[in-house]
Structures are given as C-alpha cells and as structure tokens.
Amino acid sequence: MRTLPLLCAALSLAATAQTPQRPRILGVAHIAVRTDNPGAARKFYGQYLGYAELSTNTFKVNDHQYIQILPGWSGPDQLVLARIAFETENAQQLRDYLASKSVPVPSTLAKDPDGNLSFTIKDPDNHDIQFVQYLPGSTHSRNFGKFLPDTRVSNRIIHVGTTVSDRAAYDKLYRDILGFKEFWHGGMTDDRTDWVDMRVPDGADWFEYMLNVRNPSQRTLGVMNHMALGVPDIQAGYRTVTDHGLTTSEKPKIGRDGKWQLNLYDPNFTRAELMEPTPVEKPCCSPMLY
C-alpha cells in the first residue's frame, strides 16, 4: 500500500509551501550615526568625502546605499552608531520568515517616511538592524541616477561592522537564520580571531564581527562600529580627500587582510575606512574565499 507514504509526502510538501522562505538580502543599504556637531559631520561626509545630500543629513553613496547623520547625540551613555540597514527584495516576506524563526519583529509593516517598506530588529548586542525594500515612488527611487557627483571618494559601501560580544549568538542570527556566509577571519596575531567577515547571501557586501572588545572608550567604539568605502586605488582616494581639504595624520597602509586601507574619522570618531577590494598581499590567518 503506497497511500500512506504518498499522503505523508503531500503533507510535507504542503507544510514546506506554507513555511515562509527567506527572500534575497542584496547588500548594505545604509549606516546611520549620531552626532553632536551636525555642521562638522556634514562637512566631513559632504565636503571631504564628496557626497551629495539626497535630503537633509542623508548622503548618497549610490542609488542603493546611503550614510545618514542624526543630530542630537547625548554623550557617552548613548551609542554613536544608530543603525545599520540591509536591502531586501521583499520586506514583508523577510519579516514573516524571521517571525517563523522566533526573531522578534514588528506585528505589521507600513511605509517609512521615505516611502519605502522597512522594519527593524535588535541584534544580540541590542544594535538596531533594519531591512529596507526600495519601493517605486519613494524618495530614493524617484532620485535614482541623481545626486551622484564626481567628487565622491567612493561609489560603494563594501561593508559595515559592529562590536560583537558573543559570536555564537551572532552566528545564529546572521549565518543560520539570515544566510550570511563567512569568507575570511583574522586577528591582530595569527593565533587569534578578532574579525569575522560575513558576506550577505545574495550580494558582494559584508558584515564584519568586531570581536574581543573590552570596556571600549568612545573612540574605540567609533573604530569598531564602522563603514568601509571601496576604492580602486587607495593613493587616489587619499589624494581626493586631502584635495577636498581633509587634514589627517593617517596614511594608507596594508591591513592584516592584505588590502590597502586608509582610516578616516568623522567628528564623533565613527571610522570611514577607505579600502581596496582585492588583497595585494596574502591575508593572515585564513584563506579569503570568493
């Protein structure tokens, strides 16, 4: 009798069809940072890094990536990092999928003030993580192809990073639930892991775990909670920001991942790391997977 196996198979397929599937997560959408000096922050991102303001305090990197500054930072008791965001092709489906995995999510979704569909969750260290679906007619979509001056030091955010106190908890969220994939890890020495690079499941950008951070100062938090701006030539990037008037004691150097980089800091110490995408030396600690 084959009736029972066929019935079980049919029920299994029906259950699978009813289980929400994860939609694509395409890349970094934006990073939002707080400041107590909006004028200086706007000068850093606008004049020195060369970005145009799509709207007040929102700087456009490309049609799908933005840097936001939020005035009103209240001091060391408030994290300067306000939010990081990733783009998804279907915010409602992603919300339903996360709910099915017991991740706390909003009960309903609505368009945000820009006219996109977005929602926010908390990561294991209570950082705000947002997922955005750009909708036709939104502020962003209406301005695709605009506000993209040649003065931009970089045309892409290639990764964002935050402090991580419990790698296992982050792996459960980012790897096991969201589908991010580790492609490199490294450390200050070859026998330790201080950074883990987790690529988005459906794109080239990545999220970086910043591990082993103990009792950080405000400046250290700015170093760790950061963004990386991809540049094809670090020396050209360095000339661009200095030609725009930025004075910095930092010089380009090769990091432990074998890539040229240049660390720059906004007025509240958030690090904007210029980085060449491809290593020029062998990375430390682990092979870099592509």
Image: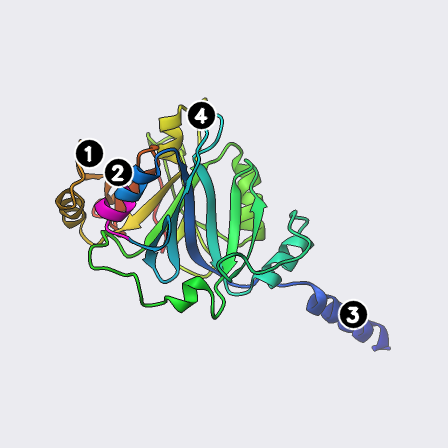
Disc number for residue 250: 1
Secondary structure beneath dot 3 equals helix
Q: Residues within 10 Å of mark 4 (few under 14, many from 20)?
A: few
Secondary structure beneath dot 4 equals loop
Q: Which residues are magenta?
A: 44-51
Q: Which residue is mark 2?
A: 264
Residue 59 in view of the camera? yes
Label 2 vs 4, first from the N-terminus: 4
The quadrant in which residue 64 appears is bottom left
Q: Which residue is mark 3?
A: 11
Q: Nearer the viewer, residue 209 or 77?
A: 77
Q: Is residue 213 left or right of residue 44?
A: right
Q: Residue at x 40, y 23 (%)?
A: 217
Q: Which residue is mark 4?
A: 76
The quadrant in which residue 14 appears is bottom right
Q: Residue at x 76, y 71 (%)?
A: 9
Q: Residues within 10 Å of mark 1 (few under 14, many from 20)?
A: few
Q: Nearer the viewer, residue 114 or 287?
A: 114
Q: Residue at x 43, y 63 (%)?
A: 139
Q: Nearer the viewer, residue 173 or 38?
A: 38
Amino acid type, callout 3: Leu
Q: Of the residues tagged 3 and 4, which is closer to the observer? A: 4
Tell me if label 2 and label 1 are in contact, CB under 8 Å.
yes
Amino acid type, callout 4: Pro
